[in-house]
Amino acid sequence: MKLRILPARTGAQWVRTALRTFFRQPLALGGLFFMFVAIVAVVSLVPVLGSVLALGLLPSATLGLMAATREASQGRFPMPLVLLTAWRGGPEQTRAMVVLGALYAGLFLIIMGVSALIDGGDFARVYLLGEKLDADLANQSDFQAAMWVSMALYLPLSLMFWHAPALVHWHRVSPVKALFFSLVACLRNFGAYFVFAMVWMLVFMGAVILVSVLLTIVSVLLGQSQPNTAAMVPVVLLMAAMFMVSTYFTFLDTFEHPEGPLVPPVQEPPHV
């Protein structure tokens, strides 16, 4: 495994490649993303430990979506079982993914714990437990401070886990080393990832503005006073699915030889 140092323009290329790949298999990739969201939502409903279990599943679910993107980019139709890629690599790989999931859940809960020290746990309850967020709570200075601190702490966590599931699965890297290599890769290629983030922000904003205009036009034609904003939800989810598709291409270009597990070649017996 070798890290590549990429030019900043690569970030825009990742977005273009992801969009092109998604629209080759929109039903498959979109459907798998919705399945992923549904699984995490159902697991989070488990009493007491649901939210923790859902957090622990995120690295393996992310790997499943990356594997689905890999299938689509190679002209194959990704089937639902591809979401279980993380659990089909043998006992050693399964243990590594469990450790990675536990690390993600633990570190995320630490971030929520830090935010609770600021606002008494209001932000954590809204984010983790789905408690209702009203205007009064959102405008409280402690709540806003907790939110910004959580976002600042989550950024390095996100970078640590950006490539970690793929490194663990396709490169057989240990979970802790995968976190370190992922963080270093993102920092060493800061320009490419910054451009990647900015282009995606523009794509998201453009899609939201376009759909908002269309909904307003439809509401005017139908004589409605307000557009149906509920129609924006599937659009946002589809955009999120496209974004998840792009994570595979960031990994593909950042590390050399990421395709497939690193299986040693078969040794032929010596000739007598």
Image (cartoon, grey):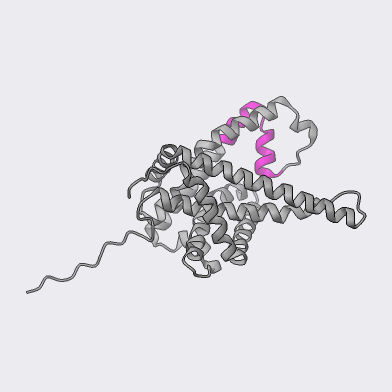
Q: Is residue 64 above or below residue 175?
A: below
Query: How many numbered marks, from 0 up?
Result: 0
Most extreme residue toward the right is 223
Which residue is painted at 50% across and 45% down in the image? 11
Residue at position x 46%, y 59% in the image? 86
Q: Is residue 119 left or right of residue 15?
A: right
Q: Nearer the viewer, residue 64 or 88?
A: 64
Which residue reaches farthest bottom? 272
220 shown above or below 205: below
Q: Is residue 111 above or below residue 27?
A: above
Q: Is residue 103 left or right of residue 112?
A: left
**Rendered position, 80 above or below 162:** below
Judge from the rendering whether residue 243 lies leftward or rightward of residue 262; answer left or right: right
Task: Classify residue 128 by image quadrant.
Answer: top right
**Toward the viewer: 264 or 216?**
216
Who is closer to the viewer here, 123 or 144?
144
Residue lying furthest left:
272
Classify the position of the C terminus by image quarter: bottom left
Residue with the most extreme front position: 9
Which residue sits at x=51%, y=62%? 68
What x and y, as percent, mark residue 106?
Answer: 51, 41
Residue 11 horizontal side relative to residue 227, left or right: left
Residue 213: give x, y in percent of width and height. Answer: 78, 50
Q: Does the segment drawn in magenta span residue 30?
A: no
Residue located at (37% from left, 48% from top): 174
Q: Work out whether residue 272 or residue 53 is closer to the camera in this orientation and state it.
A: 272
Q: Give the overall secondary structure of the magenta segment.
A: helix
Question: Can residue 23 be seen?
Answer: yes
**Percent position (x, y) of residue 118?**
64, 26
Magenta highlight range? 111-130
Task: State the image coordinates of residue 9 (x, y, percent, origin top left).
Answer: 48, 44
* Residue 96 visible from this viewpoint: no
